Amino acid sequence: MDPPLNAMTPRLRRALADAAHQASRAGHRHIGTEHVLLALAIDGDGIAGQVLTHLGVREAVQDRLSEVLPTLGGDAGGVDLVGDPGTTQDPSPGKP
């Protein structure tokens, strides 16, 4: 069972919305770990972004994933962006 949206922190909701945006930009119908990683790398304020920065790979992760995501098939697992009929999912990003 998925946690209700109101049980998620604002940062988590924003990260998932940003990941959905990255998936949509790549023409994918599912959110996968690659979309989440890209969204977290773009948001340098979060812990994941800070870790990637500390490791010196944040910019390289952003560049490489932005380059390869559009070339990957978009239907291989992940969380469906379309959802069930009657749901209201907003895949728009929290910030550009």
Image (tube, helix red, strand yellow):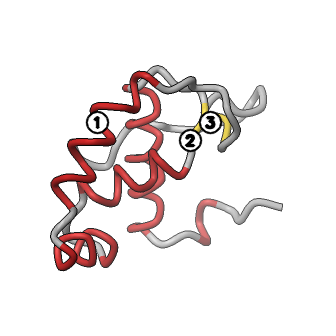
Q: Quadrant of the C terminus?
A: top left
Q: Which mark is residue 50?
A: none
User: Residue beneath label 3, please?
Assistant: 88
- Image spot of residue 5 (x, y percent): 61, 60
- Image spot of residue 24 (x, y percent): 45, 27
Q: Nearer the viewer, mark 1 or mark 2?
A: 1
Q: Secondary structure beneath disc 3?
A: loop
CA–CA distance in space, label 3 to label 1: 27 Å
Q: Is residue 89 above or below residue 82?
A: below
CA–CA distance in space, label 3 to label 2: 16 Å
User: Residue beneath label 1, please?
Assistant: 66
Q: Secondary structure beneath disc 1?
A: helix
At 70% across and 39% down in the image, what residue appears?
77
Rendering quarter of residue 51: bottom left
User: Residue beneath label 2, please?
Assistant: 31
**In this view of the protein, which residue sits in the foreground, 86 or 72?**
72
